[in-house]
Amino acid sequence: MRERDLVGREGRFIVEGEVTLRVMLSERARFSLESILLSPERVEGLADILTARTEPVPVYVAEKAVMSAIAGFPIHRGVLAAGLRGAEVALAVPPAPAPALVVGLVGLTNHDNVGGLFRNAAAFGADGVLLDAAACDPLYRKAIRVSAGAALTVPFARLPDGAALLAFAAAHGLVPLALSPAGRETLSDLAPPPRALLLLGTEGPGLPQTLMAQARTVRIAMAPDFDSLNVATAGALALHHLAAHRLG
């Protein structure tokens, strides 16, 4: 069961660990569950959510050695599940003049960062996440785990490139805010627009200059001998600032 064989094949993805399985079995999950594979010692601890489910789902039990042979990697947590992506849908944004906050990921290929940003989006009440074609799959097993299951609940959609993300912002009345160490405005001084698209780029190259030229650029003030943060950390700071008035 190699993950690269699952990506884009028959619409399946893998959920690993109790935390993410509980999210997958909750009403918040946006995807359906095909089957569950557990080690014997994990069955009793998960009995509450397995028996509470109104729609039946096959639950298979096998020793960890068997699970590892099936999965192709060591299964330490003893919890796996197969999810079904279903048909892709466009990202729905609250219509103006209602407040709206969307996260845009451009060129992010690190699963830890993408998972962390989905967790941030959920924590600060973002309405959804847009990814360009180069960004990695938020339903990759590690990204789901790092997101603490937020990748299963936060609405997301994929667009071709940064230009398409800007077009989405224009069509939905969102102010594009490009987060960059070279930003012209300081985050702490920024009056959060009621409707915003927060654009985040990959570490190192950052956001393309062509994209930043068409957005308001914002930086996070920091010590003079250091100019950047991990993108998930920077995204958390920016989302907290932009959503503070919504969270109370």
Image (spheres, grey):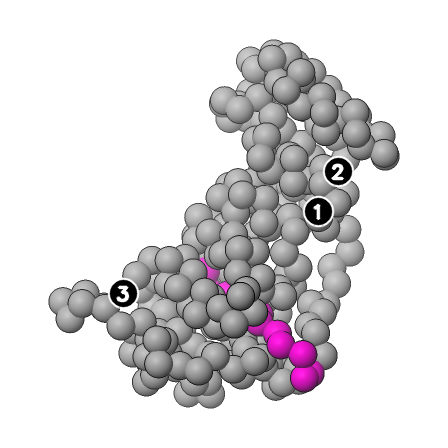
Q: Residues within 10 Å of mark 3 (few under 14, many from 20)?
A: some
Coordinates of residue 129 in the picture (x, y in percent): 58, 64
**Residue on which the image places disc 1:** 29
Question: Is residue 17 visible to the viewer in this orientation of the structure?
Answer: yes
Q: Secondary structure at mark 3?
A: loop
Question: Residue drawn at (18%, 67%), measured in percent from left and top?
Answer: 223
**Tally of numbered discs:** 3
Residue 58, placed above or below residue 88:
above
Q: Residue furthest front?
A: 248
**Residue on which the image places disc 3:** 228
Mark 2 touches mark 1? (CB < 8 Å): yes
- Residues in magenta, as a range: 96-108
Dot 2 or dot 3: first in sequence order is 2
Q: Secondary structure at mark 2?
A: strand
Q: CA distance from mark 1 to mark 3?
A: 34 Å
Q: CA distance from mark 2 to mark 1?
A: 10 Å
- Give the amino acid at mark 3: Ser
Q: Secondary structure at mark 1?
A: loop
Coordinates of residue 84 in the picture (x, y in percent): 74, 43
Dot 1 or dot 3: first in sequence order is 1
Which one is closest to the eye, mark 2 or mark 1?
1
Using the image as rendered, state which of residue 212 and residue 194 is in the foreground: 194
**Residue on which the image places disc 2:** 33
Question: Residue drawn at (72%, 25%), measured in percent from left and top?
Answer: 48
Coordinates of residue 204 in the picture (x, y in percent): 31, 64
